[in-house]
Amino acid sequence: MHDDGMRDRTETQAFFAERAARWDSRFGDDLPAYTAAIATAPPPPGGTAIDVGCGTGRALPVLRDAVGPTGTVLGLDITPEMLAVAATRATAARALLALADASQLPLPTATADVIFAAGLVNHLPDPAAGLAELARVTRAGGTLILFHPIGRAALAARHGHALRPGEPLAEGPLRALTAATGWTLTAYEDGERRFLATARRVSATAPPRER
Ligand SMILES: C[S@@+](CC[C@H](N)C(=O)[O-])C[C@H]1O[C@@H](n2cnc3c(N)ncnc32)[C@H](O)[C@@H]1O
């Protein structure tokens, strides 16, 4: 791990590989919170919903329920062991899984109606690059849902540290980051019980450069 608390790609994969088998027994109780989070900005029936950093695929059934039988659900993750655990759930939800890095997605531009990313952004070495890539694959007017089933302060305490100033998910930095990467922040909640931020894709073209 680096001084700033970030892991590189290999370290991130190793970190989650070791936890994949126990992930659901440890965090399975959170499922109603995922359902409630997606209900705040559900993908349209027949639409395309992508769970980036899908882990064991806990959100895939909820996304399938939202898009209905004619929609498309994808689960993407950088850790093969997480995807292996997700496989049964993905089959039941008729979701496709792929090994992919959020900063370089193997998807065409303007594919998604909704991107759901739970617990992802804190693990990206370059959050701006990740959010820009999520914007690239989202249709104009599409939605980004950033979620965690506990708030930032509780999560930091769980990890044994205080909140760091300027963290990408703090409201000010996230507002600036989303604006710089093709999104408009539309809602922000960082309570004890959940972190939930939503953003709307403002344009299908690259964000304007600063003059
Ligand atoms: C905290 S876990 C959350 C998993 C799942 N979203 C959930 O809520 O149960 C973070 C997940 O993001 C994945 N991840 C981390 N960095 C990633 C990246 N650059 N691209 C894609 N997935 C990544 C990890 O492998 C892990 O499965």
Image (tube, rainbow, N blue to C red):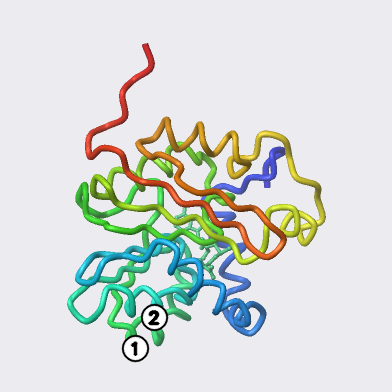
Classed neighbour count for the residue bearing mark 2: other residues with Cα under 10 Å, few (<14), some (14–19), many (≥20): some
Rate crowding at label 1 as few (under 14), some (14 to 19) or many (20 or more) other CA atoms within 10 Å. Answer: few
Choose the circle earlier in sequence order: 2 or 1. 2
Q: Nearer the viewer, residue 164 or 142?
A: 142
Q: Give x and y (percent) for residue 20.
A: 57, 75
Would you place residue 173 above or below residue 83 in this image? above
Amino acid type of disc 2? Pro
Q: Which residue is mark 2?
A: 61
Could you say where residue 69 lies in the image, as x and y percent from the top left? Answer: 21, 81
| Displayed quadrant of residue 12 | bottom right
Q: Are marks 2 and 1 in contact (CB under 8 Å)?
A: yes
Dot 2 falls on a residue whose secondary structure is helix
Disc 1 secondary structure class: helix
The answer to whether residue 168 is left or right of residue 131 is right
Please indicate whether residue 136 sits to the left or right of residue 168 in the image.
Answer: left
Q: What residue is at 59 percent from the left and 45 percent from the top?
A: 169
Q: Name the quadrant containing residue 112.
A: bottom left
Q: How far is mark 2 from mark 1, CA to CA?
A: 8 Å
Q: Which mark is residue 92?
A: 1
In the picture, the quarter occupied by the C terminus is top left
Q: Is residue 86 above or below residue 168?
A: below
Q: Is residue 76 left or right of residue 142?
A: right
